[in-house]
């Protein structure tokens, strides 16, 4: 970032159960290079998708408190489909002055893209069984009418955790991730642009963006992979512009990436640093560990 660039002082808070939300942070940085970001990776408590709603709601509130304490955030991006599905309404109620942006599976864009009328959706159990997702699904289906569209929905138990652990172990060890992708895609049916085939695949979990190369290889070149990072970044930009104006935020200058972006983890600092370097080209100095939490990825309940 050029040293002379002006940066608004209040940061944008971003959180996920782990490193998945870095895919959203990537898009946020591209859209708003002048902003400060504080990212929270809750890896010690991942995966959220296999936890109870109460657990995810409690974590989301705790993280929001800590983001506010760390950087007086002007907005929070819930860069996690699962936390958005179960916790965003209660966050909005608890913090009425703070704008929240959530992520949800891109079903609507998929309707505009599909030609075969069969759209695959992959996500966590928590997201796909939530009332919020079920409501989205029926709304989108009604709006799509008379264009017939069938959604083939598949919960991918263990996939987010495998992506998380792959980052922790070694960047090249993709065996478990590949195995799970293969298994779940196989269960969904045939992919391609032929009649009756699934020609669009919605990535309904921010972690899955980091398995895109594997998914691409498995579904073939003709299938559209649809994620939400860019749309979320644009929405955040619209919201933050309003928040910034109404609060007449101070401005300051940041000379290093580490001034503009802080990444915090409750889990492995090494895994976060790997991911930050690999996907965001950020130096290890941007990464910090939240003290007082377990150093390994927590078991699912
Ligand atoms: N990355 C998250 C999501 O988009 C959560 C994955 C998990 O922790 O299960 O749903």
Image (tube, rainbow, N blue to C red):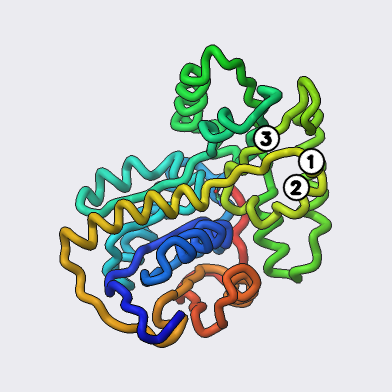
Local packing at callout 2 (Cα closer than 10 Å; few below 14, some 14-19, many 20+) is many
Give the residue pinned by disc 1.
219
Give the residue pinned by disc 2.
215
Estimate the x, y position of residue 47 in percent, counting from the top left: 58, 52
Local packing at callout 1 (Cα closer than 10 Å; few below 14, some 14-19, many 20+) is many
Q: Which of the pair 67/56 is nearer the observer? A: 67
Q: Which mark is residue 200?
A: 3
Q: Is residue 176 above or below residue 274?
A: above
Label 1 and label 2: CA atoms lie apart by 6 Å
Q: Please give left or right for residue 244 compared with residue 290 in the image.
A: left
Q: Who comes first in sequence, dot 3 or dot 2?
A: 3
Q: Quadrant of residue 267?
A: bottom right
Q: Is mark 3 within 8 Å of ligand 1?
A: no
Q: Quadrant of residue 111?
A: top right
Labels in figure, total: 3
Query: Are the residues at dot 1 and dot 2 in contact (C-beta closer than 8 Å)?
Result: yes
Label 3 and label 1: CA atoms lie apart by 10 Å
Local packing at callout 3 (Cα closer than 10 Å; few below 14, some 14-19, many 20+) is many
Q: Please give left or right for residue 41 compared with residue 59 in the image.
A: right
Query: Are the residues at dot 3 and dot 1 in contact (C-beta closer than 8 Å)?
Result: no
Q: Please give left or right for residue 233 compared with residue 281 in the image.
A: left
Label 3 and label 2: CA atoms lie apart by 12 Å
Report the residue at 62% width, 39% height from top.
202
Q: Which mark is residue 111?
A: none
């Amino acid at each position: 970032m050029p040293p002379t660039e002006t940066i608004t002082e209040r940061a944008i808070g971003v959180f996920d159960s782990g490193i998945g939300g870095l895919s959203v942070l990537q898009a946020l940085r591209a859209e708003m290079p002048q902003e400060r970001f504080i990212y929270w990776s809750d890896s010690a408590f991942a995966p959220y998708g296999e936890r109870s709603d109460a657990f995810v709601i409690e974590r989301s509130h705790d993280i929001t408190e800590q983001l506010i304490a760390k950087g007086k955030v002007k907005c929070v991006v819930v860069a996690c489909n699962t936390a958005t599905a179960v916790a965003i309404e209660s966050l909005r109620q608890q913090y009425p002055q703070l704008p929240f942006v959530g992520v949800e599976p891109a079903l609507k864009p998929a309707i505009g893209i599909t030609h075969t009328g069969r759209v695959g959706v992959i996500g966590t159990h928590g997201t796909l069984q939530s009332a919020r997702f079920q409501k989205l699904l029926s709304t989108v289906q009604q709006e799509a009418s008379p264009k017939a569209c069938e959604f083939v929905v598949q919960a991918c138990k263990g996939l987010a955790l495998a992506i998380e652990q792959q980052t922790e172990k070694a960047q090249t060890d993709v065996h478990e991730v590949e195995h799970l992708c293969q298994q779940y895609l196989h269960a969904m049916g045939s992919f391609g642009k032929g009649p009756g085939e699934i020609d669009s695949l919605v990535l309904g979990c921010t972690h899955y963006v980091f398995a895109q190369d594997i998914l691409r290889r498995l579904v073939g070149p003709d299938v559209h992979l649809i994620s939400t990072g860019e749309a979320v970044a644009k929405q955040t930009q619209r919201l933050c512009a309003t928040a910034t104006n109404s609060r007449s935020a101070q401005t300051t200058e940041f000379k290093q990436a580490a001034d503009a972006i802080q990444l915090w983890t409750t889990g492995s600092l090494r895994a976060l640093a790997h991911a930050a370097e690999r996907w965001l080209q950020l130096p290890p100095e941007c990464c910090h560990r939240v003290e007082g939490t377990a150093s390994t990825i927590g078991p699912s309940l």
